[in-house]
Amino acid sequence: MTVFVNRSRTAKRIVCVAALAGTMLACPLSAHAFEKLHHLGGGVGPSILNVHNNGNALGLSAEGHYAYGLSDTFNFVVEGGATLFPMNEPALKCASPCADKRPPMPSLLGQLGVGAIYNLDVLKFVPYGGILVGGYSLSGGRIDGVNLAAGAQVLLGVDWHTSRSVAFGLGIRQHFILTKFADYPSFSQVFLRAEYKWGG
């Protein structure tokens, strides 16, 4: 009985050591320190804007960003972009004057935000999350001129660092157009991104 228990403990120790060794091998030999690094990049991808009582508008977004490594884990970020929407506004289901009660779908939505992101530097695949605050511009369609709004966005994503200078990634942006939240309660984007880094 004692021999069986000892063998069982030995087997568990072997499994633990093997798991630890596998984790160490999966990690890079050098950490991807973000401190004092400059990041310049951009991305493209689909987006969806929900318009209150007016359905969803599907669009194509492009973004550009600059980031600076404040520390190994926190980056200061400036990100701007634009989204083009086709003119796919649903037809009115009632006669005018109900048209004035339906928020218009824009054909162009611009955004600019500043904030910070937190990097979880574990493997060559680096997940991150952050918050930006900034402004939005809506134009085209039934919108006269340019409507400006203030809001915020939550950033989530993962970057694959092929080297110290180059990274590719997938990013998700959930926007909250706060001063026009009743008309546009949800704006979401997904980006395929590329980034060049230098300095440090």
Image (cartoon, rainbow, N blue to C red):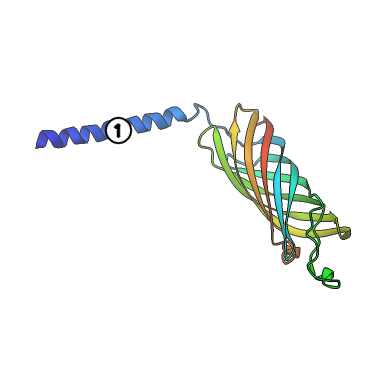
Task: Please tell me how crowded label 1 is: few (under 14), some (14-19), or many (20+) other residues with Cα within 10 Å.
Answer: few
> Seen from this angle, which residue lies furthest bottom?
97
Image spot of residue 25 (x, y percent): 43, 27
Q: Residue at x 86, y 71 (%)?
A: 96
Quarter of the image with the N terminus is top left
Q: Is residue 66 above or below residue 114?
A: above
Name the secondary structure under disc 1: helix
Image spot of residue 32 (x, y percent): 57, 32
Question: Pointer 1: what residue?
Answer: 15
> Seen from this angle, which residue lies furthest right?
145
Left or right of 87? Residue 58 is left
Image spot of residue 174 (x, y percent): 66, 53
Camera-side residue of 120 and 70: 120
Residue 39 found in image quarter: top right
Q: Residue at x 67, y 42 (%)?
A: 191
Left or right of 5? Residue 85 is right
Image spot of residue 114 (x, y percent): 72, 49
Residue 55 found in image quarter: bottom right
Q: Is residue 141 above or below residue 62?
A: below
